[in-house]
């Protein structure tokens, strides 16, 4: 039988052990008392001194007192043992009730687990389908992202070409403006020289 709640096998064993030890002590004390009585009988038959008789008598009184004390202790230990046995019986019944309640609850849980098992399988199947769909969508998105990166790279290259072209145009424009300024200055100088010559000729006439 399993050890009941609130009761240890060590506690029951120690009580029984103490009970057996006290019984052995009582038996040895009774044997000693019997021997002392035999000695007293022999002393009555044979002559002994008063001191020896008194010593034996004191020893007998001490042994009787110890024997009485041991009987009291044994009675207390028997009372403890009976109380402990009563507790064992009560706790054993309580344990049996708890065992039956546990088995009933376990049976109910097993039934619920069996019922939920099919639902769980359906949910797992549904989750697998959703996961597969998500993986496909991720593959599509990854492809789109790669396309976008390629387009961004092309646009970046086109922008760089455009910037280079605009830079070339600005340089060409600046060169054209510079040439126009140079030509204009030369034209102005040529016009000024012709006008000066004409004035000189007019004065000479």
Image (cartoon, rainbow, N blue to C red):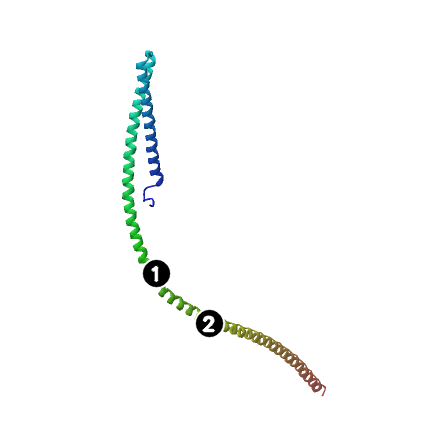
Picture layout, residue 99 above or below residue 122? above
Distance of label 2 from label 1 (alpha carbons): 34 Å
Q: Residue furthest bottom?
A: 205
Q: Residue furthest front?
A: 45
Q: Position of residue 146 (x, y in %)?
A: 52, 72
Pointer 2: what residue?
136
Closest to the observer, 16 or 170 = 16
Is label 2 in a helix, a strand or a loop? helix
Pointer 1: what residue?
113
Closest to the observer, 169 or 137 = 137
Please tell me how crowded label 1 is: few (under 14), some (14-19), or many (20+) other residues with Cα within 10 Å. Answer: few
Is label 1 in a helix, a strand or a loop? helix
Picture layout, residue 36 above or below residue 128? above
Q: Position of residue 159 (x, y in %)?
A: 56, 75
Q: Position of residue 57 (x, y in %)?
A: 31, 17
Closest to the observer, 197 or 92 = 92
Q: Quadrant of the C terminus?
A: bottom right
């Amino acid at each position: 039988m399993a050890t009941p709640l609130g009761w240890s096998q060590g506690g029951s064993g120690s009580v029984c052990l103490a009970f057996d030890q006290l019984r052995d002590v009582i038996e040895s004390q009774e044997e000693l008392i019997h021997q002392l009585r035999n000695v007293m009988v022999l002393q009555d038959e044979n002559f002994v001194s008063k001191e020896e008789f008194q010593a034996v008598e004191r020893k007998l009184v001490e042994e009787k007192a110890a024997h009485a004390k041991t009987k009291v202790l044994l009675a207390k230990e028997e009372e403890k043992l009976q109380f402990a046995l009563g507790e064992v019986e009560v706790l054993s019944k309580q344990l049996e009730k708890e065992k039956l309640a546990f088995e009933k609850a376990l049976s109910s849980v097993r039934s619920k687990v069996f019922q939920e098992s099919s639902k769980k399988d359906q949910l797992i199947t549904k989750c697998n389908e959703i996961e597969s769909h998500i993986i496909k969508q991720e593959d599509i998105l990854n492809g789109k992202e790669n396309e976008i990166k390629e387009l961004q790279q092309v646009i970046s290259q086109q922008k760089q070409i455009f910037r280079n072209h605009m830079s070339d145009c600005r340089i060409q424009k600046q060169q054209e403006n510079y040439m126009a300024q140079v030509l204009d200055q030369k034209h102005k100088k040529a016009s000024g020289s012709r006008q000066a010559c004409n004035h000189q000729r007019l004065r000479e006439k």
